[in-house]
Image: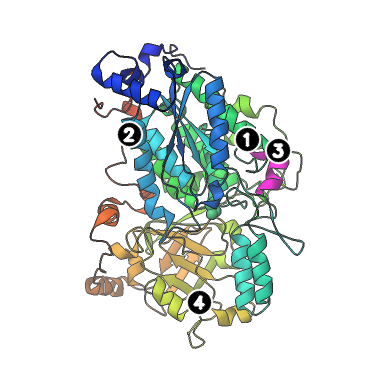
Amino acid sequence: MNAKQRKTPEQLRSHRWYGVKDLRSFGHRSRTAQMGYHRSDYAGKPVIAIINTWSDINPCHSHFKQRVEEVKRGIWQAGGFPVEMPAMSLSEPFQKPTTMLYRNLLALETEELLRSYPADGCVLMGGCDKTTPALIMGAISMNLPAIFMPAGPMLRGNWNGVTLGSGSDTWKYWAELRAGNITEEDWQGVEDGIARSPGHCMTMGTASTMTSAVEALGLSLPGYASIPAPDSRHAQMATLTGKRIVDMVWEDLLPSDILSAAAFDNAVTTVLALSGSTNAVVHLIAMARRAGIPLDLKRFDELARRTPVLANLRPSGKYLMEDFYYAGGLPALLSRIPDLLDLEQRNVNGATLGENISKARSFNDDVILPRDKPLVANDGLAVLHGNLAPNGAVIKPAAAEKHLLKHTGPAVVFKNYEDMAARIDDPNLDVDANSVIVLQSAGPQGAPGMPEWGQLPIPQKLLKEGVRDMLRISDARMSGTSYGACVLHITPESHIGGPLALVKDGDLIAIDVEQRSLNMLVDEAEIAKRRKAWVPPITKFSRGYGALYLKHIKQADEGCDFDFLETDYGKKNTSGAGNVSGEPEIH
Ligand code: FES
């Protein structure tokens, strides 16, 4: 339990706005009255900022207009004063070139909203892929009491009696359409039925991976990350989240009280047991570094070697998030691996992880697999090194055809996404099932924004021959709903002169996942010759946010945070009114 003294109203951060007798606080009070609030509505109460990433163009958060009212209800009931603050919505299906370009902008916006307004604590409303890490990164840096409210997955997709999974079945049926196995009419039926309720993607994609990781970290109420968005229990969770944050402010329960190296190990282990998205690697590293915890690729690989995949969820397995919730959800899964977790880590509800999962059980052993019948025994993720990836690369072995996990084949190189789009389906392309498809210039600087291009398409002529998986390598990311033998996040990226930039058509590429290696079989003298001749590509942005991004973005193995944001603010915090982040206070 939190050993800190409960705060007094005078110790609230908002007291400096509302509680003092000076000219500026007169303005704050009179302008609050202008909005219809009497001073008894807020005087001496915690002001709770609700950072809401609702937008008309984000279908994953389309229920947030209603949910925010339920969060407010909980805050009022617990004696707080709710203040909704809209923030940038990172809508995965719509934002170009990729939401990843804007993750750090939302993180920055979250931090600065909390810093510049009279917030004593915050509720973070997110779920669509990058919104979760962005909100958490900002809240960690600000280090005010913070609780995350997950958007929840949408209901199962449905078409002609077939259950459809977000993303995974898009890629699957797109390949079948290109192979000529389904009609345009079928494809339209998939389009109409694959997303049929509010909520984020319902496969174990990046959204469910990150909301589950945040629950395991302890930053959202236990057992709630997997509730389907339209379920009435989701609305109840929103109200309970609002109630809890008010007490967290009085208890002065901060992210820095909850986050530790062991808590991040719990989150990584959770991601691995779920066979979660490879995007979690980038996001968890960025989140940990905001808290001053040096999580790295090596730690992911160490934990992967001992963690079984127990969630039988697409894209690696069979079921969807709705099934997972009915089967007991994340607490049931975690209760199967207590020996792999640090059960003493705390949750925002004030209890330990061990206490929170002590009564959990599985109601469907085909969805949450028993320990002795894992989907795969270990290696939900593998970190590769070699002359192609000196600082690392990742692959999700469980989602790949097994024969490709130890493979050597000739490279078919595309110098960027446009080149690939123009030539991949050329009937004259010199490619066969043994080839290794290589995409350059798709990393944090190169694309820019490190888009989810890493599930490179299988050439159409091979699809028609029945090929459904090939070894594909790039410095891009891959959607968590994707599958296949895709090596991702190659670091350093090609755009800044990483070895990936030096690969040429026909070079032999060798992967051995068991040995954790990725190499191009080209002799050192030839590589040195190519390096000397390499010309850096032109940078794409010269002004605006893009220019700021290119100047400060770090590589994937370091979490792709901005260099000026990756700090240990959280550790410097001393808490209490007037000092919340280690940064100079604003007056
Ligand atoms: Fe929002 Fe997949 S599109 S989570």
Q: Which residue is mark 1?
A: 235
**Nearest the eye: 101 or 491:** 101
- Coordinates of residue 185 in the picture (x, y in percent): 68, 74
Residues under labels 3 and 2: Cα distance? Answer: 36 Å
115 to the left or right of 151: left
Amino acid found under the numbered disc labelled 1: Ala
Q: Alpha-carbon distance for marks 2 and 4?
A: 44 Å
Which amino acid type is marked by label 2? Asp
Residue 427: horizontal and vertical position, in percent?
A: 52, 87
Residue nearest the viewer, comparing 103 with 481: 103
Q: Is mark 4 within 8 Å of ligand 1?
A: no
Location of residue 435 with respect to 60 vertically, above or below: below
- The Cα atoms of the two marked residues, 1 and 4, are separated by 50 Å
- Local SS, label 1: helix
Residue that label 3 marks: 328
Residue 139 is one of the magenta-drawn residues: no
- Which mark's residue is nearer the viewer, 2 or 1? 1
Name which of mark 2 and mark 4 comes first in the sequence. Answer: 4
- Residue 417, quarter of the rendered image: bottom left
Q: Magenta residues, as a range?
A: 321-330
Is 120 displayed left or right of 585 in the figure?
A: right
In the image, residue 423 sits, relative to residue 364, either above or below, namely below
